[in-house]
Image: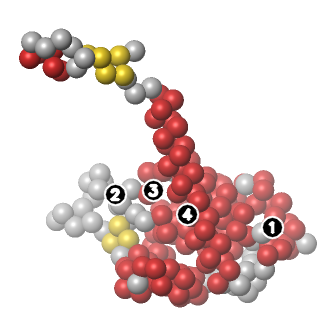
Amino acid sequence: EELEDIGAANGKPPAKVPAVSPTTESQFLSFLFRKVLRIVNFRIDAICHALQLPKEYRVTNQIQIALRFLLRHHIEALYDRHVDHFVLCSIYAICKVMNVKPEVTFVKLIDTYIAVRGQELGELACQRIVRQICLLPDSAENFNNGQKPIGNIIDLYNRIYIPKMKKHLLYSKSLKRQTAVVSG
């Protein structure tokens, strides 16, 4: 199917402009999604390595699965937020569910994040990423005098991440299998 050019209104013969096919759009979105996942997987690996998480736990695989689930089923969670917010939330959640030892706390996770990403972004930018997070997207109408509610990574985890991911974290078959391997 082709669309007619606006030039026809100016007395010129209409030029045929190819319409964007749904497959072109889906190919672009697939490409974009793969790029985001590649970057996210690199960050997950770097943070997990810095946290010295045991390889036999296969925590990174479960974190990647959880993040892919979030991106596929709750993409709206990313509105007005940085993907690193959900990388950190996923690392924390999976480590909690799998009962990873040594325990991963938010303090340890934030310090590790700043150490790993601070070289690239700068410490101040990393501090802002974990401490100044919009808790409601722009479209939300619950602003106080035009101010968006701002919180930290723990607020985001409790208010946004857990409500969206609770079912996945509790009922994921691969997560249950891997947790059984770790605790067994």
What kind of element bears circle 4? helix
Is residue 161 at all visible to an observer of this figure? yes
Label 1 and label 4: CA atoms lie apart by 26 Å
Tag 3: residue type? Ala
Please name the residue that numbered disc 1 is placed on.
Answer: 179
Q: Marks 3 and 2, Cα distance to the nearest angstrom? A: 8 Å
Q: Amino acid at mark 4?
A: Ile
Q: Where is mark 2, residue-wise?
A: 137
Graded by Cα atoms within 10 Å as few (under 14), some (14 to 19) or many (20 or more), the crowding at tag 3 reads some
First in residue order: circle 1 vs circle 2: 2
Q: Secondary structure at mark 1?
A: helix
Q: Which mark is residue 77?
A: 3
**Quadrant of residue 8 in the image?**
top left
Which numbered mark, 1 or 4, is in the foreground of this view? 4
In this view, the residue in front, 120 or 37, is 120
Which sits earlier in the primary sequence, circle 4 or circle 3?
Answer: 4
- The residue under the point 42% across, 79% down is 121
Residue picked out by circle 4:
39
The location of residue 36, given as percent across then percent down, is 52, 57
Q: Does the CB distance between marks 1 and 3 fall below 8 Å? A: no
Quick one: label 1, few (<14), some, or many (20+) residues within 10 Å? many
